[in-house]
Amino acid sequence: MVYHGASYPKVSYWATFFRGKKELKEKWNLSLEDILLSISLPRGKVGKPDVMEVERLIHQEKITLIHSLMLYEGKKTRDVLDAYLMRYEIHNIVEVVLSLLYHRPVTMLYDLGRGHRIQKPYTDEVKNLKDVQSLLFHTPYYRLAQDAFAEMERTGDTFSFEVQLSNLFLKKLFKAIKQSGELQAWKDTLLFALSMERVLFVARMKFNYHSSVEEVLAYFPVVWENRDWWRRLLMAKDFEEFVALLSFVLKGESVQDLQQLSQVLSQKVVKRLWRFLHVPTSAHFIGAFIALQEFMVENLQVIIEGKRYNFSWNQIASFVVEGGSHAVF
Amino acid sequence: MLFSERLKKIEVLLKKEDVERVVDWLAHYGKFEPIPIDDAKAKEYHLYHTKNIETAQRIANLLRRTEDLVMKMTGGVISPQIDVQPNWLMGLSELDSKLSEIEKSYQKILEQMADLQRRKVDIEIRVRRLQFFAGLDIPWQKLKNTSLFYVGFGAIAESQYSGFVQAISELPVEVRYVDRIGGDVVVFFFCDVKYKESVERILKAVFYKEYGLPFDAADNPHQRLMQYSFDLTATYDEELWLEKQKAKIEHLFLPDLLAFFEVLAYRQRLVEISDEMVSSQTVSLFSGWIPARDEAIVRFNIEKITGKRCTIETKDASRAMIEEGLEPPTLFDHPSLLRPFETVVKTYGMPHYREIDPTIFSAFTYVLMYGAMFGDVGQGAVLFLLGLVGGFLKAFRKMQNLLKIVMWVGFSSMVFGFLYGEFFGKEDIIQALWFSPRENVNQILLVAVGMGVILISIAVILNVVNSWLEKDYAKMLFSPYGIAGLMFYWGILLLVVFLFLKKPLPSFIVPIIIVGLVLIFLEKPLAFLLFHHGKKFPNPVMGFFDLFESMINFLSNTVSFMRIGAFALNHTALMGVVFLIDSMIANPFLKWFVLLFGNVFIIGFEGFVVGIQALRLEYYELFVKFFRGTGKSFDALGLYRNKEE
């Protein structure tokens, strides 16, 4: 039995920062500057008027909270959390690569703390993909970079690289979770959220880019449990069949298009995970919170960006995920 | 020696451009502890705090890069033998460029090694390809000019292989798994050419690398195989050469990188100090503590650096305490003989600036108690030599203080060994100069208690002095460890001695005990009435508990010292067991082995236990009576990071 008693009070407190739509709408009525100044996160008020800086800080908060949890958790859970940080490391790699390929400045890099190389100040010296490859030396991404960079430089297409990075992340996370001794807890929470993310990825590939079945299979090998279901999902012939296979999540909710599917799935994930936040005896509450904080940050980002580009509340409301106990009741 | 070094507070107002050089000198001087200047003081001079965020960030980044490189080179295990010689004058830009150079050359070697590995795998796959096709019983050479089939031989990274298999199984493609070589899965496949496009899409997704069929080697596969084996041998040679180059770079640059660490940490401290200063556009003000006797040196040097364009004010630390409410740190200034025992004191706490420094007391009592408990000329000499020789060895550099303590307790053991007449547990080799504990059990226990009485009394007297220095007169006069406690304790001791000797009691003893008891009982009310301690008149009943507790404490503390005698007896008894086992063995070789092992065991085990017991007596029977331990250590601005052992 793994002990998580020291983390539970922290997580319970942090979860209170996941605002419901009502509270976010109240915020929406403020000016952009006031919104920025009023944003408070578990570690304190952001209190800065600069949009980019605030966005960086709210995203960085995810890492800070994970690091904070790692201080209070045992080795096995720490390994899972460490594996999860790979997600943000991958974000940094992709961000740097895209900035080089499309000659645009790097928008945001996570500060991952000690022991990680794909972050500032190391990325400051990077001038081309060869430098990125050097930077990735002695990391699990190096081999992939060796295989992918030449082609990427030629075509500018990073899709395969991104997907394979994501596969690498999932593989490492699975391994850590299997060794944690709490497979079910993570499966119910974090892996569920990640699998829904992957479902959306597959849906986009199939119905936006009209990729063939074998292409989808090559990019998204069935490594999850419930292999049969995944196989049927990957091979679904049309959107209706795809949605029908998701009935256990959608629970009768009708979905017409991809955008709607994305919104409904996000809400369903939040609703499902919220109740696990209050299971202190296992890693349920940690897994749930790690997944939920992504939505929490996403909501804040939607509000900031919506206000910044003068959208109305009605235009952005559907992109805001209902949080807090409103998500459940 | 009875008090820590007398300090002075120094305030320097100087031109901004001189700050760096002055602070740099102070760091080299090594006995300056900066004091943060508060806003009120800053306002007084119309100055303000400024933070050098950019430099701090730059230093943090450089530190991170240096740490990363050191980790790569050493894997976190750094030999203490490396001679680190920091160049304190090195600027950040110079350091940055040197660090970049090292990073580049090291990275280059690592990449060359990685490329080499890749090339090796590449050759191995080509060799495997020849073997594979040589063993194939189909005329594959005919596929060279075919337009009906799409054929491939290549490698896929292991991590992508499952995706490849799942996707390709959806198509009518014949796939042969060939081998797994260096993280790659080698496959051979063929299919109808009409599926070429679909297959290519899959291959693209999994970063397939095509090697092709070996048509060019079909006629003479042996010659090609020879060529590959030659290439492979060359890569092994190259690998060896690169390994050597890598080791050379590590050997050459690791001391530099470790020196960078020191320089960066030093620069970081300078930035922190600058942050604590207050400045205007042209001038800066900083303050700190310095040893009072160095005032002239500090003044002279700062004036020399600034060309006398500065104002220096000094103030005695005691005055700064009263006038500004500052708490000066404690700076020890002991002769080298006493320095190892600072550790014993610091482990308990740091004496306050105006408190008696207990180092000399603890050094004397610890060595004395240890020797009394472990009196043996031979085993003491072993400990003494261990401490002496260990002190000269570089490998034990970090244990210098401990080894010096071992040396002194060994010496004390030898002295007591002569007094007890013990030599490696034998009592018939040297004549006891005093008495043998084994033959005089009562005497050794009485001596131990007597030693306790003397030490407890000294501790209480030290508390009286400390309370007087603190101007806590109530504590000095009425507390259980003050004059009242001393009256009670000595009164009881005299009473016991006279009763024991069966002599008539002098008339003053009982009144002394009663006065002592009454004063302890009334400690808090008296402190309130005479010295205005506390906000309201305390409940006098509480005095009863204090009284009861102090009576019990004095009794138990005194009895506790009996362990000194008990351990002296214990030593004899343990050695007796060794001799008993020895006497039961006939084999002369085994006899010597038992003697040797027995002695080593007793020196190690008993020596350790006695060390703990002496420390326990030091802390719990003596220090608690007089040592407050609430001071803070003098944290001097220095070149090196704090290297507390």
Image (spheres, coloured by chain):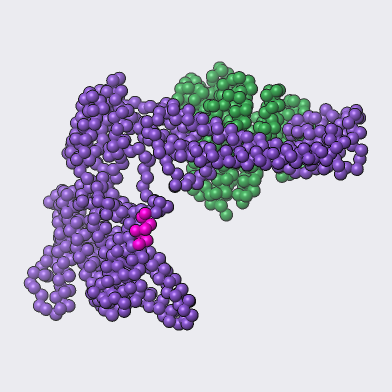
Residue B39, above or below B229: above
Residue A62 x, y percent position in the rendering? 53, 35
Would residue A29 be found to the left or right of residue B324 on screen? right
Magenta stretch bounds: B385-392
Residue located at (33% from left, 62% from top) = B384
Residue B430 x, y percent position in the rendering? 29, 76
Residue located at (21% from left, 38% from top) = B294
Hue used for the chain lettered B: purple
Would residue B537 be found to the left or right of residue A138 on screen? left
Residue A225, above or below B619: above
Can residue B561 be seen here?
A: no
Residue A125 position by quadrant: top right
Residue located at (30% from left, 39% from top) = B30
Single out the residue that lies furthest toward the left: B507
**Chain letter of the green region:** A
Single out the residue that lies furthest toward the top: A310
Depth check, front residue: B240 or B347: B240
